[in-house]
Amino acid sequence: MRVIRDGYHPAAYNMALDEAILRLNEGAVFRTYSWEPSAVSIGYFQSIEEEVDLNAAERMGVDVVRRITGGGAVFHDRDGEVTYSIVLPPGHPAGKRSAAESYEVLCGGIVKALDILGLKAEFAGINDVVVNGKKISGSAQTRKKWGILQHGTLLYDLRPEVMFSLLRVPNEKIRDKMISNIYERVTSMRHLGLDVSRKDVEDALVNGFSDVLGEEVEDSEPAEEELALAERLMRERYGNREWNFRR
Amino acid sequence: MGTGNGTSEGRADYKVPRGKLIRVRVVHNNGIIESVRFNGDFFMHPEEAMEELEDMLAGKDIEEACTIIDDFLRNVEVAGGSAEDFKKALKMAMNG
């Protein structure tokens, strides 16, 4: 398994490189990354205007991007999460099953990572990993002829007031309620009292996925062809209004 | 909401119990769908199937649309909602 520890990047690059790796893969590739500036990603089927307060995003300097994967809108706080992506080639044992089954297998890598960090977590379906019944990680997957891409987040901090000023909510009263109630549904490593560095979280994710996939770790960088394709995908899709506003 | 010439826009936001949100935006004329969008935070594999389904529903009435949704979703993996949920959301939007 190639492992790319990719650091902090803009939203369009993050999504473009995930897709480029998927299209060009010759074997399993695991990547960790964060978002700079902070960003909102929306699911493939969502309407950007229905989900995101675009004025607030512009005011706050937050990127907005449509993913290639389904699921919901996510606030990717620069310092609040580590994001991962895993690409599996066609025919990989962990990818052969239905999406529902491979979510469970791949989310096992996150459960294992949290175990390494000292937290007892479990897969809670469809694509969530929870600690004490509260969500700490969400993922989304797409299945193409080139293989499977799953990407997702692992939260180490949470700023609900920022999140809900960017994501559209029905009204102000509900916004306040969503902010005050969020800790009933969502948690983060910081809220669980875990004092770990970003590198600790990356290491745990790499080892967790290596373990559940039975793949040896081979440290790597994005290849030139991957970066070139990512550049093209940024122009044609993730940095392009037509893609981001298509629904 | 009428927009003249018998064309109406309907919308419905349907939260699937223990599932995801389906947001339907439909333009119809005397019960015939002109265009429809199913937005939301559900999953569909392959994703492009949704646009194919939306195109297939244009020109159909609600009964025909429901049959198409049933047939189509038999061969597509959806998480967070079922054919029943998409049909229910569409009916809500057509009536609303």
Image: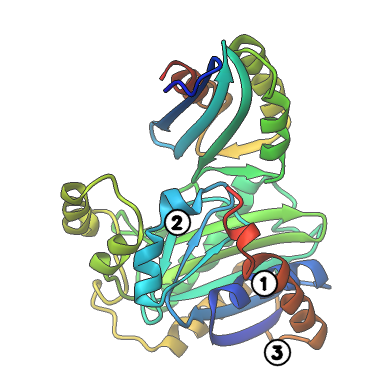
Q: Chain of mark 2?
A: A
Residue under pointer 1: A16
Left or right of A162? Residue A144 is right
Which of the marked residues, 3 or 2, is nearer the chain's N terminus? Answer: 2
| Way the structure is coloured | rainbow
Say whether residue A171 is left or right of residue A35: left
Chain of residue at mark 3: A
**Tag 3: Cα neighbours inside 10 Å, few (<14), some, or many (≥20)?**
few
Residue at coordinates 29% horizontally, 70% vertically from top-left? A158
Q: On the image, which quarter does residue B86 sit in?
A: top right
Secondary element under disc 3, as helix, strand or loop, is: loop
- Label for residue A73? 2
State the image coordinates of residue A199 (x, y, percent, origin top left). Answer: 46, 89
Given residues A4 and A234, the one toward you in this image is A234
Tell me how far mark 1 sits from mark 2, CA to CA: 18 Å
> Measured from the top left, where is residue A46 in percent x and y?
52, 48
Q: Amino acid at mark 3?
A: Glu
Residue highlighted by disc 3:
A221
Q: Residue at x 35, y 58 (%)?
A: A167
Task: Report the quarter where the N terminus of chain B lies.
Answer: top left
Assign a secondary structure to mark 1. helix
